[in-house]
């Protein structure tokens, strides 16, 4: 039997355990890997494969749901760290073995311990004091991290650890308020959503005036519009902040009109692509100096562009704008018929095609 057929047999969940044991002893590593990854592989096959030299096979053995504690103990001392990571990720691992791996010299192994559902509070506490900040970070990101641990991580020397602790929904309000004044902008930005959840309006107002744009950007991302937080950001010096507001679901028409006159093409284009533009905003953007923004107005959107807008854009000096009007399935027949006489051949042809569409 060729290797392809053997591999297919080794992968199949219908293959008998006795046959999988035979396949585990073949000379081809791809077949052996398929056995190691098969959830129906018997312990005997996994025991045989645990003596293999290929790391990929050993990792598959460690992650197999049928792996025994004896095999995991053996693999936990392997010189290749990636094998030890797989052991730490195993759903079959014991708490005792997790405790052993929590002392492993490689931080990736210790991080894998944190992510294992069998990890205990005692281990979380131990690893929250790990010398490697990436390990402490992974402790802080755990949804059910204890309050005691988060209280300590809020004072961590590493800004990313403090930031992730501050973004954790379980962090006490005292520490959250402390982090709102953290010297590092990344910490202040990461806690914005958590402050909103706790209704800390005054702290959010302070952060809306933060000197760092990455913090103000997080305020702009808040999905509920709040004049006290968002209104002054409409003229924020940072373009990314204004771009974010231009896409805000609850952006008021008055603010939309301001952004329609923004100095940034990117900001105005995001306004032009919205479905909820008022007549006043349309009138501003129809006259925009950038033809790509005028063309954006003519795109077929969720809400059909008003007929009067398409009619005006049909006589735009830019041929690409007129072509977009001709292509728009919502363009009225009367406007399309005018475009049949457009000076540009491509526009005329597109108008003809649109008029002939059966679904119109």
Image: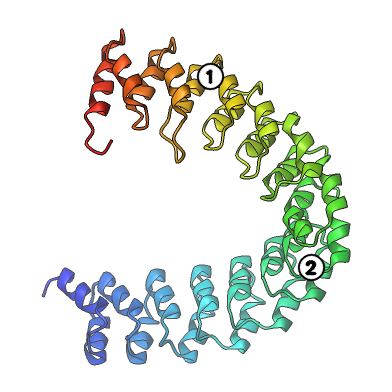
Q: Nearer the viewer, residue 228 or 29?
A: 228
Q: Which mark is residue 171?
A: 2
Q: Is residue 82 left or right of residue 192?
A: left
Looking at the rendering, which quadrant does residue 58 occupy?
bottom left
Which residue corresponds to the image point at 65% horizontal and 44% vertical from the top-left? Answer: 250
Q: Is residue 258 left or right of residue 322?
A: right
Q: Position of residue 83 (x, y in %)?
A: 48, 73
Between label 2 and label 1, give the one nearer the viewer: 1
Q: Earlier in the sequence, mark 2 or mark 1?
A: 2
Q: Nearer the viewer, residue 339 or 65?
A: 339
Asked if 342 appears above or below 208 in the picture, the reply is above
For label 2, the crowd category at 10 Å Cα-Cα, with few meaning under 14, some 14 to 19 and many 20 or more, is many
Q: Nearer the viewer, residue 205 or 211?
A: 205
Q: Residue furthest left?
A: 1
Which residue corresponds to the image point at 38% horizontal and 88% vertical from the top-left? Answer: 47
Which residue corresponds to the image point at 61% horizontal and 78% vertical from the top-left? Answer: 101
Q: Position of residue 177 (x, y in %)?
A: 87, 59
Where does label 1 land, which residue? 286
């Amino acid at each position: 039997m060729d290797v392809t057929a053997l591999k297919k047999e080794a992968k199949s969940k219908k293959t008998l355990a006795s046959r999988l044991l035979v396949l585990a002893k073949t000379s081809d590593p791809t077949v052996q890997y398929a056995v190691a990854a098969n959830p129906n592989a018997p312990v005997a096959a996994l025991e045989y494969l645990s003596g293999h030299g290929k790391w990929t096979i050993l990792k598959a053995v460690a992650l197999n749901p049928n792996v025994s504690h004896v095999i995991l103990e053996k693999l936990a001392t392997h010189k290749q760290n990636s094998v030890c990571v797989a052991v730490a990720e195993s759903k079959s691992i014991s708490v005792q073995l997790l405790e052993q791996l929590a002392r492993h010299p490689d931080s990736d192994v210790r991080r894998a311990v944190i992510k294992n559902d069998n990890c205990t509070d005692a281990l979380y506490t131990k690893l929250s004091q790990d010398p490697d900040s990436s390990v402490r970070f992974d402790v802080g990101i755990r949804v059910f991290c204890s309050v005691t641990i988060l209280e300590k991580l809020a004072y961590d020397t590493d800004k990313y650890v403090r930031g992730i602790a501050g973004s954790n929904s379980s962090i006490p309000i005292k520490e959250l308020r402390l982090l709102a004044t953290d010297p590092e902008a990344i910490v202040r930005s990461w806690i914005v959503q958590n402050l909103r959840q706790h209704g800390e309006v005054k702290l959010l107002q302070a952060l809306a005036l933060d000197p760092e744009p990455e913090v103000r950007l997080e305020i702009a991302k808040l999905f509920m519009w709040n004049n006290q937080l968002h209104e002054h950001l409409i003229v924020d010096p940072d373009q990314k902040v204004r771009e974010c507001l231009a896409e805000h679901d609850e952006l008021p028409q008055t603010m939309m009109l301001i952004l329609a006159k923004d100095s940034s093409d990117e900001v105005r284009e995001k306004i032009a692509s919205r479905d909820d533009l008022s007549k006043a905003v349309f009138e501003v953007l129809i006259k925009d100096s950038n033809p790509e923004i005028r063309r954006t107005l003519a795109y077929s959107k969720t809400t059909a562009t008003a007929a009067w807008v398409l009619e005006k854009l049909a006589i735009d000096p830019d041929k690409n704008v007129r072509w977009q009007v001709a292509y728009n399935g919502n363009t009225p027949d009367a406007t399309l018929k005018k475009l049949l006489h457009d000076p540009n051949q491509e526009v005329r042809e597109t108008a003809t095609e649109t008029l002939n569409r059966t679904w119109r």
